[in-house]
Image (cartoon, grey):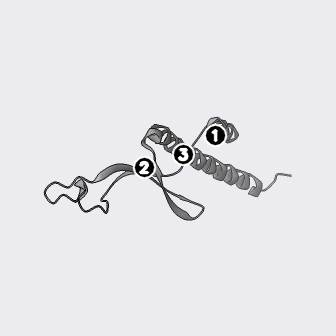
Amino acid sequence: MSIEGQIAQVKKQLNQMDGFRPGSVSQQYNVCGKKECRCKDKKNPQKHGPYYILSYRFDGKNRTEYVNPQYLQMLEARLKNYEAFQQLIQKWVGLEIEKSRQEMTRLSKPRKR
């Protein structure tokens, strides 16, 4: 398949994508401030949680958000879509680089008279 055809295919795949987000999800367990709480038991402390945290970088800033457990499945799908999006963009850039190289090579060859 030609480079132009491959680029068209990547564009089509990008156009079909729906819902994506950057980042990763982690679990966090916390200790509260109550003196008599189970999280401060000297023999068997039981921290509160898990709490789910989404961490990502956007617009030059690191960000974190708490995520309600009921949205984890939807969020995981969007994180996976973002990885696919990034791979498609990398593929497109690579194809554009190769297309540009081929064009410059073709234009730099001496013309026959």
What crowding class fits label 1: few (fewer than 14 Cα within 10 Å), some (14-19), or many (20 or more)? some
What crowding class fits label 2: few (fewer than 14 Cα within 10 Å), some (14-19), or many (20 or more)? some
Secondary-structure class at tag 1: helix
- Amino acid bearing label 2: Val
Residue 97 lies, in percent from the top left, at 64, 53
Spatial distance from mark 3 to mark 2, Cα to Cα? 13 Å
The foreground one among 38 and 66 is: 38
Residue 46 lies, in percent from the top left, at 23, 52
Asked if the residue under mark 1 is in contact with the one under mark 3, i.e. CB atoms within 8 Å, the reply is no
The foreground one among 95 and 12 is: 12
The answer to which of marks 3 and 2 sits earlier in the sequence is 2
Q: Which mark is residue 52?
A: none
For label 2, the residue is: 25
Spatial distance from mark 2 to mark 1, Cα to Cα? 24 Å
The answer to which of marks 3 and 1 sits earlier in the sequence is 1
For label 1, the residue is: 14
Residue 109 position by quadrant: bottom right
For label 3, the residue is: 82
In this view, the mark in front (3 or 1): 3
Residue 35 position by quadrant: bottom left
What crowding class fits label 3: few (fewer than 14 Cα within 10 Å), some (14-19), or many (20 or more)? some
Query: Where the N terminus falls, by quadrant?
Result: top right
The foreground one among 86 and 26 is: 26
**73 to the left or right of 86:** left
- Amino acid bearing label 3: Tyr
Identified at 63% across, 46% down, the residue is: 92
The answer to which of marks 2 and 1 sits earlier in the sequence is 1
Residue 14 lies, in percent from the top left, at 63, 40
